[in-house]
Image: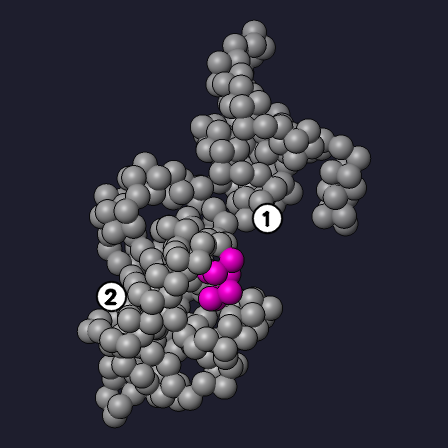
Amino acid sequence: MSKQKQDLGKGIRALLENMSGDEGEELIRKKKEEVAQSNYIPLHAIEINPFQPRVEFDDAALADLSGSIAIHGVIQPVTVRRLDNNRFQLISGERRLRASKLAGLKEIPAFIREANDQEMLEIALIENIQREDLNSMEIAINFKRLLDECALTHEQLAERLGKNRTTVTNFIRLLKLPPDIQKGLKNKEISMGHARAIISLEDPVAQLDVYKLIIAKGLSVREVEALVRDYVVRPKTAKKTVTVPGHIKKLQDQIATQLGTRVVIKQDKTGKGQIVISFFSDDDLYRLKDMLD
């Protein structure tokens, strides 16, 4: 997404702060021309987009945008589709719509376009992806919704977004990571680079091992890539390999995911055995204790 489009979402004050006088005036002139060519629609006549994937709006950011709109007006029209009885449904621009209501506006500039439900969903999801504050997991979830609900292939989605097909595939692969690692990505405890290295490991237990080491030791992406290579090429030991039954392996992976650490279940022929739970620090040990309690 271009710098200009990013600035437009922040209000006119941010736009002017990040441009020279001539650049700012020229962009504002163009945006005013867009507004002049749009329709003004009463706010009460616009329904919220039922396909809106974004459910959280920052109150402070809305208040800031509302203040800018109260002074300068809306410089980027919203997009709507026409319903019956002079009613409209929002396609994109809910943040601007909310801020305009806060600013006390009675009407808002809008582009009216034809769109069916499928197109509404696709537009809403694509606009949501273009937000600059999305984390990697939110992008991955939106990509998956576009693929599933809009019946798109990876190639078609990449073309619509103006991205490389590999980029789309890499984000979709994040959804296969254990929940704890996905949470770490969402909370920005690890980066997309860390996650891509972890995905190279097929075993979810090994993935959790590496993830815990990243958190405990603050490993860089290159260090993680080296660690993953070590996992992949690690020579087999001379010890006798014990085949774990499928149902035990599944249970082992489930417990590992729930606890967020490496878990090994050992069982002999009589059915007796033990569960080995790994921890990586005192804090990690107490975390596990609290979960087990």
Q: Residues within 10 Å of mark 2 (few under 14, many from 20)?
A: few
Q: Is residue 175 above or below residue 234?
A: below
List the residue tagged with mark 1. Answer: 187
Residue type (three-letter) at the residue carrying disc 1: Asn
**Callout 2: SS:** helix
Disc 1 vs disc 2: Cβ atoms closer than 8 Å? no
Residue 245: tell me if it is visible: no
Label disc, if present, on residue 152 of the rendered structure: none
Q: Which residues are magenta?
A: 11-17
Q: Is residue 216 left or right of residue 257?
A: right
Residue type (three-letter) at the residue carrying disc 2: Glu
Name the residue: 29% across, 50% down.
161
Name the residue: 25% across, 75% down.
37
Q: Residue furthest left?
A: 114
Name the residue: 58% across, 45% down.
188
Q: Position of residue 117 (x, y in %)?
A: 25, 71
Q: Residue furthest top?
A: 238
Label disc, if present, on residue 119 of the rendered structure: 2
